[in-house]
Amino acid sequence: MIRRFLLASALFVTGTVVAAPGAFAGTTGETADQTVNFQGIIPQVCVFGSASSGTLAISGPNSKTLSTSSTGGGQGGTSVTCNYGAQLGIAAPIAGAGAASALTPTSLTSKATASSATLTSSEAKSDGTKVTLKTSEATTINVDMDVNNGTTVIPAGTYNYTVTLTVAP
């Protein structure tokens, strides 16, 4: 038993003496350094601002087209800021309730004109054309849409459509 105690004590003292220079900095006038590493994973994020609604109008009493570019119409819009070079896409307009759901248009198109400090008037279109946004720049997006009703005049009524903007890697 005493031999085990002496052996354990000898190992403890030897370990303390061997470890002392690195473990107890400054005890012999030496310095010790320790590196602490840091890592962070930042996800890709985009934040949209508030959306403003657009206004649809026709170009005259016998118009076959409903558009934001007709007299009395107006663009909708929003803004977006991404921490990466996201792709901005826009979907074709989707008819809501009311008169819009009764139409059988020959085409529904939309486009988003994006601009920021270093991005000038690039267009995303509902045909699949996308715009690469600038990293960390607030981008203004103006949205236009058109409903072409073929050879049929747009009847009187309240028309509601939605257009979806998408940002993705």
Image: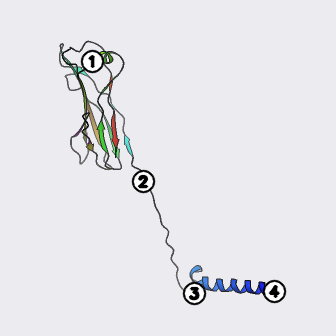
Q: Is the magenta stretch mostly helix, strand or loop?
A: loop
28 or 5: nearer the eye?
A: 5
Query: Going from the N terminus, do you reach mark 1 or mark 2 first?
Result: 2
- Residue that carries the numbered disc 3 in the rendered image: 28
Query: Going from the N terminus, do you reach mark 3 or mark 2 first?
Result: 3
- Residue that carries the numbered disc 2 in the rendered image: 42
* 146 to 121, vertically: above or below: above
Query: Going from the N terminus, do you reach mark 1 or mark 4 first?
Result: 4
Query: Going from the N terminus, do you reach mark 4 or mark 3 first?
Result: 4
The image position of residue 127, as x and y in percent, is 24, 34
Q: How far apart are labels 3 and 2 at the CA level?
A: 44 Å
Q: How far apart are labels 4 and 3 at the CA level?
A: 33 Å
- Residue that carries the numbered disc 1 in the rendered image: 104
Residue 49 counted in the magenta span? no
Label 2: how many residues lie within 10 Å, few (<14), some (14-19) or many (20+)?
Answer: few
58 or 98: nearer the eye?
A: 98
Query: Which is closer to the viewer, label 1 or label 2?
Result: 1
Residue 2 is tagged as 4
Extent of the magenta region? 119-130
Q: Are marks 3 and 2 in contact (CB under 8 Å)?
A: no
The image position of residue 18, as x and y in percent, is 61, 85
Q: What element carries label 4?
A: helix
Q: How is the image coloured?
A: rainbow
Q: Do the residues labelled 1 and 4 touch (CB within 8 Å)?
A: no
Q: Which residue lies at the image location 28% right of the left edge and 17% below the top edge? A: 103
Label 3: how many residues lie within 10 Å, few (<14), some (14-19) or many (20+)?
Answer: few
* 19 to 80, vertically: above or below: below
